[in-house]
Amino acid sequence: MTHPLAPETMVQVLKDNGFTKVKLFDAEPWTVGALSGSGIEVVVGIPNDMLRSLASDHGLAEQWVKENVTNFIKDNINIKYSPL
């Protein structure tokens, strides 16, 4: 059985091992939030099941960016981009 690391522990492990960039495959607030103030560059991925709807609906894509990128940038999280 595996036990996931607490987000804060994960961030410390990344920093202790010299990581300056990380790619997250979704924008779970508890994971992204732990990177606040860490100085680690973040790439936030879009879940595969959302790709089609975001590609076909500009308004939905804007809303996703607002909720999953813009809100985190305000919290001092260094999001460089999200591949749309």
Image: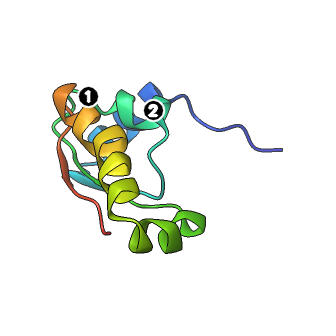
Secondary structure of the residue carrying tag 2 is helix
Specify few, some or many for label 1: CA neighbours under 10 Å numbering under 14, 14-19, or 20 or more: some
Image location (x, y in percent) of residue 36: 26, 28
Closer to the camera in the image, 12 or 39: 39
Give how far apart the Cα atoms at labels 1 and 2 are. 11 Å
Which quadrant, please, contains the C terminus? Answer: bottom left
Left or right of residue 41, residue 63 in this image: right
Frontmost residue, 73 versus 37 = 73
- Where does label 2 land, which residue? 29
Circle 1: residue type: Ser
> Where 3 falls versus 61 (above or below)?
above
Q: Is residue 50 left or right of residue 27?
A: right
Q: Is residue 54 left or right of residue 37?
A: right
**Residue at the image point whose x is 40% and y is 73% from the top:** 55
Q: Which residue is mark 1?
A: 36
Residue at the image position 51 percent from the left and 74 percent from the top:
52
Kindly report which numbered mark, 1 or 2, lies closer to the viewer in this rendering.
2
Q: Position of residue 3 (x, y in %)?
A: 71, 37
| Quarter of the image where one finds residue 1 | top right
